Image: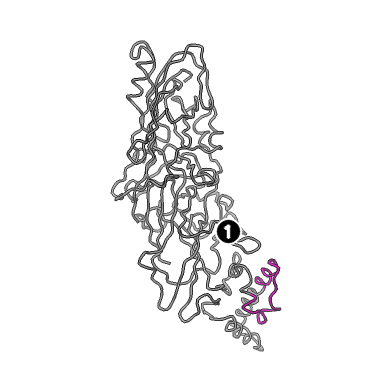
Amino acid sequence: MKLDKIFVTLFVALAMAACSNDEEMITGGNQLPVDGKAAYMSLSLAMPKSSGTRAPGENHGTANEQKVNELYLVLFDASDICLETKILSATDYILNVGGADVTGYNGKAFKVPSATAKVLAVVNPSDKFKAACAVSASWSVINSVVEQTVKEVIGAAKDNFMMINAGNNVSPADGALVAANVKVVDGTTYVDATAAIAAAEGDRSVIHVDRVVAKVSLGVNASGVTVPAGVTCTFGNWALNVTNKSMFPYSEIIMPAGGSSGADYRIDPNYALAGFNVLQFNYLEIAADGSLPTDFSAMTDSKYCLENTMEANAQTQAQTTAAVVSAVYTPNSFTIGESWFRLLGVTYKTLADLQTVYTAAKSATTPDAAQQQVLDLCDQFYARMSAAATAQSKTIGADFAAITIAELDAITNGGEYSKPAAGETVGVEYFQKGVCYYNILIRHDDAITATMAHGKYGVVRNNWYTLTINSVKQPGTAWVPDKTDPTDPENPGEDNDDEEAYLSVNITINPWTTWSQGVDL
């Protein structure tokens, strides 16, 4: 896997005219009273991340992924208590994208409380995050777990990506809040507002921000996908499965042992294995009428999700974000687009072929164990398909021997109903018109190869994972993969101050951190 480090950066500097002793501070949000003692601040945050040895290139993302619709500043005192929030206009900061300043962003000075010791910059903040940023609230409270949908943090049109202080992977314990340099009009160092403003604008802060979502893309090898002799496999739409429902606005950085240089890993709200519950995640579900989730779309579409990380022993299939892709798989000598079946490891070209085996077992005076298993599994399959047909206002034959392939093929996403229930043995697998599904667990860092090693799997904010399918060895499942146990939601499944100051701001959008993952199915 190849990493191209990408960053989203903010340059924050402080400056503007002082207020009188009696004036109140005008802000874009909350405010504290002031004592009239003017102060000015300029904040610089050096790029906290390094591309290290894994970054031969960068990808800053699309114009929509870089767009700054609102810059929201949260100012804290030395005890990490919120003093004020501000919404900055384009004249209040300098915007730098990909190493170049964007025209129209002037970096003029503006006021902040002189007690300001630390600062948090948030681009395109969600409404839920802004609601948490109350004056006198501690940073720990503001940064509490919040349930968010992807739409709430990227916008309905995918042009309003929430970004927040990136932190420092060299010194993760430093956390999110950046130290602020306040220029106070004290009559000595800075005798008046003009001097303080000039000092602040000459000492502009730089804050790096990351997008709070991860990005995933899926494609096939440009040279073609390797398949078994005689087999054809054509890939269709895809979706993300097992995506997080909640996030920390800022998530703690950790650096797994043996990982790639500069490859951040983070701690999300359901990081630990203990307390796992399926209610913490979004899973792909087939609708009552058999239709696929609307999440499925063309492979040309990239998708976004909240970060989803886990401690080493929590790398389980029900807790790990995956890509699910549909395909039409046609075994050697089979007809493309026609349905086929599999039972107990044996592949059947037609329903009639399987029905012949069923009828023979049923005609036996005393079926042996193998025959009885065939009967039980075929009857089980029939019961499921009959229920599906009824739910879809359709009809099928009276029993397994009487059903027709036309009846089965008329059931919307019929293969889905051959999925075994929790604890059941896989029975008849119905590959309706050859359709199957592959589950691709997303690896965060391919440099981590040990079994269940920390940081191996997961999706991390501001990381772009590109998955490329290289080969196929066998068909996928006839149903959309579901790694949950509906009978046991605790089972995660199989292992994977008050005074005024002035702040002037520059903002730089860093590129996405990109990862490439080759996939053999």
Kindly identify the residue that appears in the image at 46 percent across and 49 percent down: 309
Magenta stretch prevailing secondary structure? helix
Q: Judge the density around disc 1: few (<14), some (14-19), many (≥20) Cα neighbours within 10 Å.
A: some
* Percent of width and height locating residue 4: 34, 49
Kindly identify the residue that appears in the image at 49 percent across and 14 percent down: 35
Q: Is residue 166 left or right of residue 476?
A: left
Is 1 within the magenta? no
Q: Quadrant of the C terminus?
A: bottom left
Q: Quadrant of the N terminus?
A: bottom left
Q: Is residue 125 above or below residue 518?
A: above
Q: Is residue 245 left or right of residue 459?
A: right
Q: Is residue 196 above or below residue 309?
A: above
Q: In this rendered view, identify the residue nearer to me: 58 or 34.
A: 58
Is 402 within the magenta? yes
* Percent of width and height locating residue 331: 47, 77
Q: Is residue 182 left or right of residue 401?
A: left
Q: Quadrant of residue 253?
A: top left
Q: Which residue was labeled with disc 1?
A: 293
Q: Secondary structure at mark 1?
A: loop
Kindly identify the residue that appears in the image at 43 percent across and 20 percent down: 501
Q: Is residue 139 above or below residue 407?
A: above
* Percent of width and height locating residue 100: 33, 38
Q: Quadrant of residue 40?
A: top left
Q: Which residues are magenta?
A: 383-407
* Percent of width and height locating residue 180: 39, 26
Q: In this rendered view, identify the residue nearer to me: 98 or 488.
A: 98
Q: What amino acid does circle 1 point to?
A: Pro
